[in-house]
Every structure is written in structure tokens, then in C-alpha cells.
Image: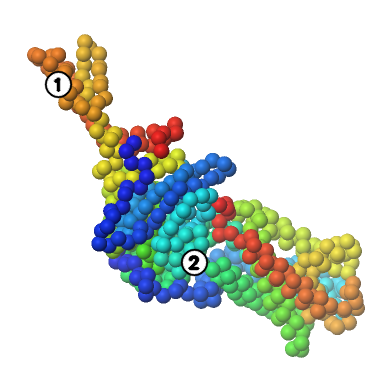
Amino acid sequence: MTTTGPAPLRQGTAIDRAPAVRVRGLVKRYGGRAVVDDVDLDVRRGEVFALLGPNGAGKTTTVEILAGLRRRDAGEVTVLGEDPATGDRRWRDRVGVVGQTTGAGDALTVLETVDHYARYHGQPQGSGELLAAVGLEGAARTRVDALSGGQRRRLEVALGVQGRPELLFLDEPTTGLDPAARRQFWTLVEGLRETGTTVLLTTHYLDEAAQLADRVGVIAAGRLVEVAPPDALGTALRREATVRWTEDGAPRSVVTPEPSAVLRDLLAATPTGEIPDLSVTRPNLEDVYLRLVGGTSEGGPR
Amino acid sequence: MTTATTRPADPGTRPAPPGAVTIGRARIGLELRLFARDSGQVVFSFAYPVVMLLIFASVFGDQEVSPGVGFDRYFLAGIAATGIMLTSFQAVGIAIAEERDRGDLGRLQVLGTPPAAYAIGKAGQVLLTTVVQLAVLLTVAALVYDIPLPTDAGRWLTFAWITLLGALAGTVLGIAVSAFVGSARSAGTGIPAIAVVLQFVSGVFFVYSELPEVMRQVAALFPLKWMTQGMRSVFLPDGAAAAEPAGSWEHPMTAAVLAAWVIIGVVVVARTFRWRRSGG
């Protein structure tokens, strides 16, 4: 494992702003079991960061602590310059949270819902503009309990960004959405990135993290096992190639960081003719992810 | 879905979020709207006291508690007090458990809603629905059952402060009890059970002075007995005070007990109220 903590921040750049989120040694225990276990994390201003991991890895707990909804047992946490555990209402108004429920009263219409929650913010976005931004302008007069799953999620996002947050938490935003609604949701998040909103999203979908995130933190069993841009995840693992062929009717394979050397030997041993079923493969992103996640269940390296 | 146009507000110029009273006012409007759209709630809140009156009047219609005071007139006091308890304590306790289960309260927590704003919304909704409920009850009592209603301002003033204090105590105790009942399902069975027991011991279903001494002492610890007694002082003739166990209406004591319960409720709420069920 090459990288275990956060990727180093670029030092000495012209705009050396403090990260939106800074976490050191975060621990949360339930009944003696650490569900978040010594996590270090930095989320830079303006980036989309994905916490990727299987169910029960500690993603939601981490986000809830960062959003000031749960208390931590140990560690330092700074979000937009303040400790979420003591963040006041001004701080909360700068943070948006999209959870897994609307919690807006099913008997209200979409427009009534956003009009009502506009009253909680210092500088809310106009309701019409907001509904247009999430593609709900056609459903403004629909009651919340009559919305489809995808529409509901859009309403949740609308409520999350209504107060013009600097930092938005999206907790498993596309779980349960059909593929089309998922794509539309991705477009929405990409739009947020363009506005300069910092986004921290959790997901257990690798393709989602790869599509949306500038950087991905892979979390498993409460530990952050790697932080990297999506195409650099598991660089060490991806350097390993598997050379396969058939010899005397039996399949053979060699896992090696130097497949050319293996091939040279193979070719030298077979000066004429074909080597049956010869192939060289490198692990794809999914293989890397599964190995990263699987490696920690036995208490892998930290 | 178009590209989001939401730009983060500049932290330097971002105005402070509105205060508890502003949000509380918005919440009263929201709570009333949600109440009005819940037809089951509306029917139960407004029709239940009338149905109770109808039952008491048909069962005991021609009997008198004391000379000149019919059973229906005596029990009107208990029904009014019960109505207040149902629209405040019972309705609020059950509603909060449901809102918590559904994640509505989680959203309020995320928004940094001041708990006081939430309480203002509940109290405002309770007071307004209680006023409508009592207006319906008294109208039916006067027009259908010919129960004489007070004509002097003093009795209506008593009616007003008992209603106000009773509804406030019920609201804060409803919020308080919601922290202990757990799921909406257990709230839906547990809270009405508390309410029914209180009704039996507080002189709502029986003539209070005829209840066993022990029951009366238990009832005297809780608000419903005092609300019922206060309502009797509104609807019964002056002479009926002599039939009370204390020999008087005990207005100062009534005010003190109800105010004490409001304060106890506020203290308990301040210490135990949680937006979510599971702590952490």
C-alpha cells in the first residue's frame, strides 16, 4: 500500500487556502467497536471528494460527524475553519447536507416545501431558480408523497443547496435510483463543481466515484486505506500484471510487476510455434478497489 | 436536469440565519397546514369531544349531579379539559415520535433549527386547534344540549387562562414524553394509555368528589385534574364549589400546579430533547 494518509497538499501555491475539511485521528466507537478508526482526511476547497467503500465501512458515520450531527470519540476535526461539534448556526448555514430522507412533510407540495425551508437560511436561493436547477420546475405543485424516487432525491438536493452552502455533504445520493436518474444526478453534481461548491460525497459505487470525484478516499472497516485521483487509485496494485498461458494442457499464471521479463523467458523457452492461450492482463479499477477493500478486513497495513 | 446555478454565498457578506421567533412563526404556519391536510387528525380533534358529550348526555341525560346541575353540564368541564389534553399532550407526543422516525427532525437538525423555534411551532398549532376544538364543543353544548354557558367576563377569563396554561403544559409535556417513548408505534399506544388513565382518576369520566381518596391524591399530582376542576369553576354554578373535596375552586393552586408543570416540562425538554432517536 503506497498511500495511507491523505495525499499531500500542494505547498506554497499562490492561493494557499486552508482545506474545507481537515480530519486527524478521527475515531468513533459503538459498543467498544471502532466504526471509524483513526481516519486522517483533507478535502480541498472547491473539489469533489468521494468517500468510497462498502456498506458498513463507516462512510455515513464519518459524514455525520463532519456535518456536526454526531459526536466523535477522538481526533481533531475542522470543517470550514470550525469544529463541527461546537459549530453555531452561522456555521451550519454554510454547510449543506443531503441525507437519505426528505424529512419535509409528505403532505406539502414541492414548492411549499422549498418556500418553507427558505425561511431557515440567511441568504436562500430563490425557489423558482432552485427548482429549475434541480429539474423540478414541472413538479412544483406536486405533493411530496406523489414524487418518484428520483424526483424526491432532487428535492433533497434542492434543500441541501438552498442556503448556498460552501460545502455540501451528499450521503449515498444515488442509492436506489434507476440508471437514468443516476446519470441526471451526476450532471447535477458536475454543475455544483462548476459553481465552486466543495462536495464530499459517499458512495459504494466505484463508477460513481470515478465519474464525479477529483479525488477518492477508499474506506473499509472504518479505515481510510487510500486517497488518490480515480485514475491513480491503487497504483502499486495496478503495476502488477498477470501472465497466463497453457503448458502441457494445464493453465499456468504468474503475477509479476515485470511481465516483459516473464514473456522473454517464456519466448526463449518456446523458440518456435505459439504459446497456447498466452495473455497479459492488468487489474482494472474494480479489481484494484476490491483488493483495497478486501485487504483490510484481516487488519491490513495502516 | 440543468446545470445548477447555486453559487456559494460569500462567507464575508453572508447574513446571519433568521432567529428562533422568525422560524417559529413560519413553523406555526407549516404545522397548521400539515394539521389541516391530515383529515384523520382534524376529525379526531374536533369531533371526539362532541362524541364524548353525546355519549354522556344520552347515558345520563336526565340525571343530576346536584340540584339544578345536570350530568351533561358537569361532564362538559371534564370533556373540555380532556380535549385540551388530547390536542396538546397526546397529539404532540405522537406527532413528534412520528416526525423523528420519518427523519423530519433530522432535517431540522441539519438546518441548525433552534429547538425553541420547533417548540413555538408546536405550541402555536396546539393553541389554535384547541381554540377551534373548544369553540365547536361549546357551540354544540349550548345549541344542542341547552347547557348554560357563562355570561360574565370573569368566568371567561378563568376559561382563557386554564385553556392557555393547560395547552402549554400539555405541549411541553408532549415534547418531553416523546424523548422517552421510542418509536412512533410505541408512542401511539403508550401516550393514549397515559391519557386514558389520567382521565379516569381526574374526574373526567366520574364525579371527582366520589372517587376514592387515593385516586384523588394521585390525580392531584397531574395537570388534568386541575384543568377539569378549573373548567368546573367556569361551567358550574357558584354553589357547586361547596361540593368540591377542598370546598372551593382553588384557583391559585390550579394556576400554580399548571405553571409548575410548564416549568418542569421546559426543564425536561431542555435536558432530554433529541432530534434523532439513536444518540451518538
What is the x, y in percent for residue A215?
Answer: 30, 49
Q: Callout 2 environment at 10 Å: few (<14), some (14 to 19), or many (20+)?
A: few
Q: Is residue A52 above or below residue A22?
A: above
What is the x, y in percent for residue B169?
Answer: 69, 70
| Closer-to-camera residue (A145/A105) | A105
Q: What element carries label 2?
A: loop
| Closer-to-camera residue (B213/B113) | B113
Q: In which quarter of the image is residue A117?
A: bottom left
| Closer-to-camera residue (A181/A186) | A186
Which residue in the protein does label 2 denote?
A88
Residue at 74% x, 60% y: name it: B196
Residue B108 seen by the camera: yes
Q: Mark 2 and mark 1: span between their CA atoms?
A: 65 Å
The chain ID associated with circle 2 is A
User: Earlier along the polypeptide chain: callout 2 or callout 1?
Assistant: 2
What label sits on residue A264 in the rendered view? Answer: 1
Residue type at tag 2: Asp
Q: Is residue A225 above or below residue B6?
A: above
- Residues at discs 2 and 1 both on one chain: yes
Q: Which residue ends up furthest to the top in the rendered image?
A: A248
What is the x, y in percent for residue A70?
Answer: 51, 54
The chain ID associated with circle 1 is A
Q: Which residue ends up furthest to the bottom in the rendered image?
A: B152
Residue at 47% x, 60% y: name it: A83
Q: Callout 1 environment at 10 Å: few (<14), some (14 to 19), or many (20+)?
A: few
What is the x, y in percent for residue A19?
Answer: 35, 58
Residue type at tag 1: Arg
Q: Which residue ends up furthest to the left in the rendered image?
A: A272
Q: Which residue ends up furthest to the front in the rendered image?
A: A12
